[in-house]
């Protein structure tokens, strides 16, 4: 399973969403797939604190690229980060030399965990990817990975990591 190099924060239907894209890297089908995203906050005074981020993604089908989506609402740790952020859209979230969130003394990482069953041998497959603050783009969305060739719909894997700016008012 491959993860995009960047996660994006997009706005859809008046909601900010934290989105991750993942896809299979082999022809072996993965069934019973589950995923979770863990927000690991590091505060200089209180240390690390992991929080499971709820996802609205119901079923993960690993035949083609999938997205994991977290709604950034008042319960989300990203609500405070976005609120404290004096950053225009379509820019990277910047950090200081220690990886700390600007002006709030808090740093964080996101760990995306994927698990499923290899349908050929029944073995468990598990993948993880860590995103730092610099790996999150606010005001972007993922480009399309599908295109038409005649009557067929084919995947354009060269666009898997492609992020496009989203113009927000």
Image (cartoon, rainbow, N blue to C red):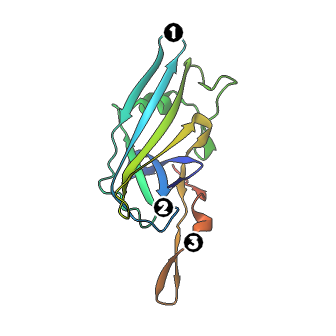
Can you identify the residue that label 2 sits on? Answer: 24
Q: Residues within 10 Å of mark 2 (few under 14, many from 20)?
A: some
Badge number at residue 156: 3
Could you tell me which residue is drawn at 42 percent across and 34 percent down? 38
Of 58 and 125, nearer the camera is 125
What is the residue that sits farthest to the top in this orientation?
45
Could you tell me which residue is drawn at 43 percent across and 59 percent down? 66
- Mark 2 or mark 3, which is nearer the start of the sequence? 2
Coordinates of residue 48 in the picture (x, y in percent): 47, 19
Identify whether 42 is placed above or below 150.
above
Badge number at residue 141: none
Res 136 seen here: yes
Q: Residues within 10 Å of mark 3 (few under 14, many from 20)?
A: few
Of 107 and 129, nearer the camera is 129
Report how far apart the C-alphas of labels 3 and 1 lie in the structure: 46 Å
The answer to whether the residues at label 3 and label 2 have Cβ atoms under 8 Å apart is: no
- Mark 1 or mark 3, which is nearer the start of the sequence? 1
Helix, strand or loop under label 2: loop
């Amino acid at each position: 399973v491959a993860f995009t190099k960047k996660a994006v924060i997009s706005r859809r239907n008046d909601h900010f969403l934290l989105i991750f894209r993942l896809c299979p890297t082999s022809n072996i089908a993965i069934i019973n797939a589950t995923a979770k995203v863990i927000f690991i906050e590091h505060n200089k005074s209180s240390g690390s604190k992991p929080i499971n981020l709820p996802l609205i993604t119901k079923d993960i089908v690993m035949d083609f690229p999938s997205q994991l989506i977290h709604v950034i609402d008042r319960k989300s740790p990203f609500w405070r980060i976005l609120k404290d952020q004096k950053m225009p859209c379509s820019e990277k979230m910047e950090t200081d030399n220690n990886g700390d969130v600007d002006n709030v003394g808090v740093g964080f990482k996101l760990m995306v965990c994927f698990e499923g069953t290899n349908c050929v041998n029944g073995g468990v497959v598990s993948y993880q990817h860590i995103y730092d603050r610099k790996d999150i783009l606010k005001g972007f969305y993922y480009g399309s990975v599908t295109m038409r060739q005649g009557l067929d719909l084919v995947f354009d894997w060269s666009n898997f990591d492609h992020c496009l700016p989203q113009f927000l008012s």
